[in-house]
Image (tube, rainbow, N blue to C red):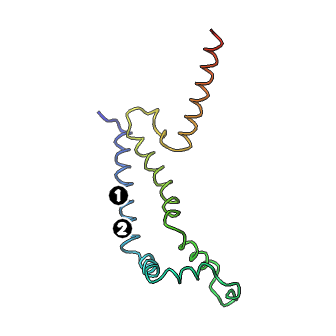
């Protein structure tokens, strides 16, 4: 039988996945900004390259503000960079919620990267101490 924490964990996982699907649907189907950007990328890669290189002579007071320039340059980053930026925190939250569904409360949060590294380092230190003690006893 599941306890309250496990039930809340499964509800959290379900809501998190539902919110993820809704966000992806909004980004790829509804958002006009993404649609315009996708069309601009399809029309020609050459235009994007000239925007990225940017001329020093084109920067005048009447040119676009630095926010627009930054936005343009960030949108030109490769897909794998954006996937990495968003996928790592997404997976960390998902794995934490998933770990809340486990029966043993001591294992909650072991999937989160910093906690996982701390546990592994602690186990390594404990193993090293135990092996040193067993070598001293013989």
**Residue that mark 1 sits on:** 18
Q: Is residue 9 left or right of residue 53?
A: left
Q: Quadrant of the C terminus?
A: top right
User: What residue sits 60% from the left and 14% below the top?
Assistant: 134
Q: Circle 1 — which element?
A: helix
Q: Earlier in the sequence, mark 1 or mark 2?
A: 1
Query: Is 84 in front, or is 61?
Result: 84
Q: How many marks?
A: 2
Q: Quadrant of the N terminus?
A: top left
User: What residue sits 41% from the left and 75% below the top?
Assistant: 31
Q: Is residue 109 left or right of residue 29?
A: right
Q: Which of the 4 quarters of the picture holds residue 10?
A: top left
**How far is mark 1 from mark 2, CA to CA?**
11 Å
Q: Residues within 10 Å of mark 2 (few under 14, many from 20)?
A: few
**Residue that mark 2 sits on:** 25
- The relative height of residue 103 versus residue 33 in the rendered view (above or below) is above
Query: Is 20 in front, or is 81?
Result: 81
Query: Is 129 in front, or is 48?
Result: 48
Query: Is 45 in front, or is 28?
Result: 45
């Amino acid at each position: 039988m599941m306890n309250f924490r496990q039930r809340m964990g499964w509800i959290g996982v379900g809501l998190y996945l539902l919110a993820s699907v809704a966000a992806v649907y909004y980004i790829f189907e509804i958002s006009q900004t993404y649609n315009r950007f996708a069309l601009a990328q399809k029309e020609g890669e050459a235009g994007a390259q000239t925007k990225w290189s940017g001329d020093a002579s084109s920067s005048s007071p009447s040119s676009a503000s630095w926010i627009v320039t930054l936005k343009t340059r960030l949108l030109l980053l490769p897909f794998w960079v954006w996937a990495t930026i968003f996928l790592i925190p997404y997976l960390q939250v998902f794995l934490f919620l998933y770990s809340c569904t486990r029966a043993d409360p001591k294992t909650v949060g072991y999937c989160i990267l910093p906690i996982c590294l701390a546990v592994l380092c602690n186990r390594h230190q404990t193993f090293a101490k135990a092996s040193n003690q067993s070598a001293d006893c013989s």
